[in-house]
Amino acid sequence: MPDDLTPSDDPGLRDSTLARIEEQLLGGPRCLDLDQVAARAEVSTDEVRLFWRALGLPMPAPDAVAFTEEDATALRRVARVAREHEVGERTAVSVIRSLGHTTERLVLWQVEAIVEHLAERYDLDDTSARLLLLDRLPDLAPVLEGQLVHAWRRQLAAMAGRFAAEFGQARVTTDGGDRLPLVRAVGFADIVSFTTRTAGLGSHDLADFVQQFESQARDVVTAAGGRVVKTIGDAVLFVADDAVAGARVALGLADAFGDGRGVAPVRVGLVWGRVLSRFGDVFGPPVALAARLTDQAEPGTVLLDHATAGLLAPRPELRLTELPERETSGLGSVRRFRLEHASG
């Protein structure tokens, strides 16, 4: 490996590198303690603590000089917007927590991907690759930051477009009910025998296995008109705005991972119904039912409940086969249907 790619083992140089990285990323040096940052932001120290906890960051000691002028600016802006728009504490904390949770996972994902690249590219052990990453961060950080802002804007614009299409012509109703607000197709797909298939894999092969599954699943879901809500190691939870799109996603996943084309076969459950969207996740009876149907599906197949099957029955390109009813934990007896391509 060339000398200029060799991570330094000089502690003094490491400290200097960290200080340079921090000053670049944090917008300046740490120069404020808790009381000072609260005064600069025109908020109470309790509000600072609440903000910091919502971001998912460890709270420094009260007398520790741990905050920057940028921290104070961020706090002041949040407090000002909350006052101007009469945003309650619960909502403000939820929004900030979404940023903390998402960016923590994002940073971890990006860092581990780059570490893996450096280890493979320069034949480094894991520790050396992580130290080399520290040397590279000053150059990488502006690019990653720019891409984050760009992706966030595109995602927000896409969300606005979906809201306009779905609710733009809707009339406001005041039926006084407490129904879950969104009607969605909700589906799960999970890898068959994940534990058995990965039991003997080392860290590199396991990472490749999980990454291939997640990447392929996301591509299939997006191409078919759905959205990935989350991935859970061996499973993916997705939603679609109409039942037909949900069916395309479900069959697309079953096809993509069948016949040796994916990392392993998957089982899929799909349900149409009302859900609640919160914290970047979805909740409600359809989610639970979709998970149960996934557990009952045969490898490479898609299962639906009776109501969802009824919506898809008129579609000539789809074939539905009723299966025996089955007692389902917490949900009683469920009428189940297997979904297939009509030409399959």
Image: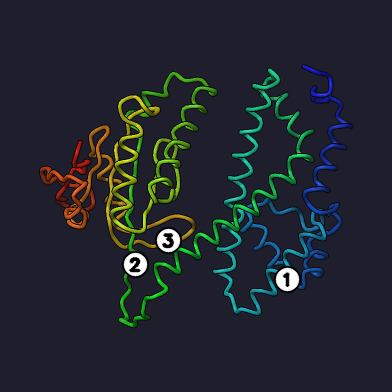
Which numbered dot is residue 124? Answer: none
Residue holding disc 2 = 180
Q: Does label 1 or label 3 sit earlier along the sequence?
A: 1
Whether 160 is drawn above or below 262: the answer is below
The amino acid on which the numbered mark 1 sits, given as a three-letter code, is: Ser
Name the secondary structure under disc 3: strand
Name the secondary structure under disc 2: loop
The residue lying at 61 percent from left, 47 percent from top is 104
Which numbered dot is residue 44? Answer: 1
Residue holding disc 3 = 277
The amino acid on which the numbered mark 2 sits, given as a three-letter code, is: Leu
The residue lying at 68 percent from left, 62 percent from top is 49
The amino acid on which the numbered mark 3 sits, given as a three-letter code, is: Ser
Q: Position of residue 233 (x, y in %)?
A: 44, 37
| Separation (CA) of disc 1 from disc 3 | 32 Å
Estimate how packed mark 1 is, as few (under 14), some (14 to 19) or many (20 or more) residues with alpha carbons within 10 Å: some
Between label 2 and label 1, give the one nearer the viewer.
2
Q: Position of residue 141 (x, y in %)?
A: 74, 44
Instruction: Assign the N terminus to one quadrant of the image.
Output: top right
The residue lying at 73 percent from left, 63 percent from top is 74
